[in-house]
Amino acid sequence: MALPVVAIVGRPNVGKSSLLNSLAGRMISIVEPTAGVTRDRISALIELDGRYFELVDTGGYGIEDHDNLTKHVEQQISLAIDRCDLVLFMVDAREGVVTLDKEVAGLLRARGAELPVLLVANKADSPKHENLVGEFFQLGFGEPICVSAMHGRNRTELVERVLEELADHDTEAPSEVVMKLAVVGRRNAGKSTFINALAGEERVIVSEVAGTTRDAVDVRFERDGRTFIAIDTAGLRKKGKMSQESIEFYSYTRATRSVRRADVVLMFLDATAEISQVDKKLARYISDQYKPCIIVVNKWDLAKDRATTDAYVEYIEQLLPGLSFAPISFITANQSKNVQSLLDLTTEMFKQATTHVSTGKINRALEAITKERAPSARRKIGLPKIYYGTQVSIAPPSLLLFVNNPSAFDDNYQRFLINRLRETLPFSEVPIRVMLRNRREQNEDEKGD
């Protein structure tokens, strides 16, 4: 049975995103005084007193979006209301009832009495603000619950009311997520279209307007009885064009954080555009985080007449050498073409990244590699020697090699060693981390024990 869904609805700037972050106990939605920051449905899995539900933040109803996305935002609000089990109708305790509040109230009443609604008056930072909320009775949803989402005031009362409303719903722990996929790339590469193809619905707004997605949107979906999370991220552009306080700066920070928390990264390229400096920088960041990555060439239907897949693969390898190990997938997201095969490939990447190899197999591989090409002696340092190696962790696969002198192994030989280990061991398409340690240090550690 699906978890109950609680949707936060209201006009712009009443504190919907702040409430989501407060109940989730972490920063999920971007909180900005600028109206219209939230456009998509931002959801979070909430656990309260051992009970679970999905909490959904929506865009501000009635916002005049400067990118002409108002209808898209309101469609997302309508979808959230249609699919939820409880609405938290948020208003501003300090400003009182305004025209947009009445419009939201009318929208909710049109859904019928079967939809439970809790009226939440936010920004009631002190008891004196509670004296101002009498006029909200005219909205027709009873006495408002006065809270301060920013400061946590009356949070417990709100939580108790929410759980009361969900008493007849199954709020047991949801099925465990098997994998988190971060979908990253430049603006207009088709990331949101791909997310919607996975979810089987318009879960995030798709528009020709660059920069439509601002937050990192977690979308839970199921395939073959398994639960995944796909993280849709804001399209990236040159960091130098962003101010430290801009919405885009926060979006960039969320996108990079999404890479760090993902099990597999899907780096989207637009087949109709040239690989840019932004793409190169993103590829370096993914590589530096040792994340399994699939390079996804989207909109291939619009480019295949100009290039073959072999030619495009060669083009990628030349411009993104740091991801030479990453497989490349050609898809057309708006037709769901090759989407399932891409998802199957993510499972293989995850399997490689979480594989543990025996010490014996690693040392047989090291012996073969050093016979193929032994490390060269370095002046004043001497002849490098590898004694043995062992795997110390997974995700990424991390190998610890005991040697006579770590500084004797130059960068070129270390790159050769890593590449050959990846080819020899079952890590052919994922990054591996190789650490060199002086065997003398190990002996001293053992004596200390």
Image (cartoon, helix red, strand yellow):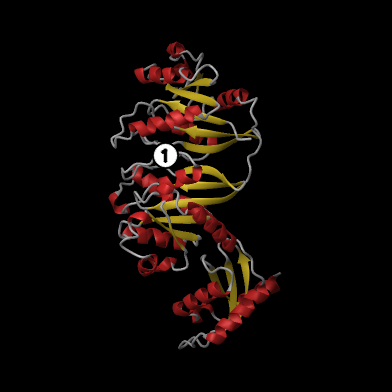
Task: Give coordinates of residue 436: x percent, y percent.
Answer: 55, 74
Q: Amino acid at mark 1?
A: Ile
Q: Left of 64 or right of it: where is 102?
A: right
Q: Left of 345 or right of it: where is 68?
A: left
Q: Which residue corresponds to the image point at 53% horizontal and 16% vertical from the top-left?
A: 113
Depth order, front residue of 270/266: 270
**Can you say whether 120 is above or below 258 in the image?**
above
Q: Is residue 386 visible?
A: no
Q: Left of 417 or right of it: where is 213?
A: left
Q: Which residue corresponds to the image point at 50% horizontal and 47% vertical from the top-left?
A: 230
Which residue is identified by label 1? 30
Total numbered labels placed on residues in the image: 1
Task: Give coordinates of residue 15: x percent, y percent.
Answer: 43, 29
**Can you say whether 345 is above or below 407 in the image?**
above
Position of the N terminus, as image quadrant, is: top right
Task: Give coordinates of residue 29: x percent, y percent.
Answer: 45, 38
Q: Which residue corresponds to the image point at 47% horizontal and 64% vertical from the top-left?
A: 327
Q: Is residue 197 visible?
A: yes
**Residue 268 is drawn in which quadrant?**
bottom left
Instruction: Indicate the secondary structure of the residue bearing disc 1.
Output: loop
Q: Left of 141 or right of it: where is 444?
A: right
Q: Which residue corresponds to the image point at 50% horizontal and 25% vertical from the top-left?
A: 88
Depth order, front residue of 239/352: 352
**Residue 271 is drawn in which quadrant?**
bottom left
Task: Give coordinates of residue 297: x percent, y percent.
Answer: 40, 58
**Can you say whether 411 is above or below 25 in the image?**
below
